[in-house]
Amino acid sequence: MPERPLSPHLTVYRWTYAMTLSILHRLSGIALCLALIGLIVWLSAAAAGPAAYAAAMSVLASLPFKALIAIALLALCFHFANGLRHLAWDIGWGYERAQARRSAVLVVAAALVAHESAHAPRTRARLWRCP
Amino acid sequence: MSLRTPLGRVLGYGAAHDGVTKWLQQRVTAIALAPLSVWLVLALLGLPTRDYAAVTAWIALGLHPVLLALIVLLALWHAWLGIEVVIEDYEARAGLRSLWLLLCAFALALLAASGIYAVLRIALRSGA
């Protein structure tokens, strides 16, 4: 197969907000794929019976997994908010540079607020209560 | 009028013209997943306890099995569309690219079957 034309590499361009959010959208999407595997393993453990479920919950209650769940929740909040931004672009809204910058800041703020409120003390107490 | 030469057409160069379908599927699954994911996270955060009896009862309750099955399928579909693009972007070697795509497709199919089976098993056991 002959060589095809190649678009310029990333390093050619000045780094921008849009590029940061774009790569974060990919990273959070990949993180959510792993979280989805976790959800399906958790459902499968619940389907397999009380012993398998207890084993799965003791793994989930360990510190590294608590941190992973917190990261997955943050990834979901970000991917959700930035996904809405992408849908807004799809209907033709927000392409001006100032608008795109404002929506970028809004997305990061909304993701952090949503993640923080999910981790509010009362919720957190309920979230980590284990059987 | 097409500007492509007969030779170019025969060699299969140019766009495959199925990109819009996947683009649209990605948006439709995103729109469907937005309310479903909010429901799932709020419901899981709101469960009073997370012991076996409470969780399986919640999974089997009313339309929950349907919603959970939808989340599993739509999220895996949405994930596939994303993973596919990531692999195509970063794996330049055609053989390896096909291998990764094949492995991911098999893994996602296995996850879909496992997820649906788990939800059905819990729902039918509790409901019967």
Image: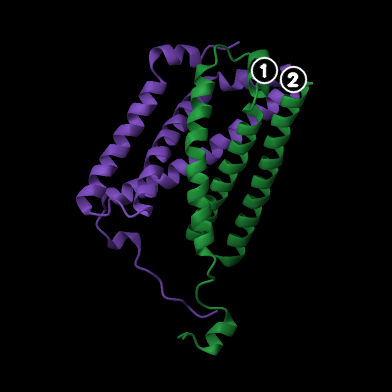
Question: Percent from the top left, x then y, of residue B59?
Answer: 65, 23
Residue in the picture at 57% in, 78% down? B12
Which residue was labeled with disc 2?
B126
Query: Which one is in front, B40 or B111?
Result: B40
Contact? badges 2 and 1 (CB < 8 Å):
yes
Residue in the picture at 55% in, 83% down? B9
User: Is residue B69 among the parts visible in the rendering?
Assistant: yes
Q: Is residue B41 left or right of residue B53?
A: left
Which residue was labeled with disc 1?
B57
* Drawing shade for chain B: green
Quarter of the image for the C terminus of chain B: give it.
top right
Residue in the picture at 63% in, 28% down? B63
Chain letter, colour purple:
A
Could you tell me how far apart the alpha carbons at marks 2 and 1 are, in whole angstroms?
7 Å
Q: Numbered disc 1: what chain?
A: B
Question: Percent from the top left, x then y, of residue A70?
Answer: 45, 26
Q: Indicate which disc residue A94 carries.
A: none
Q: Numbered disc 2: what chain?
A: B
Amino acid at pointer 1 = Ala
Badge 1 crowding class, 10 Å Cα cut-off, few under 14, some 14 to 19, many 20 or more, is some
Amino acid at pointer 2 = Ser
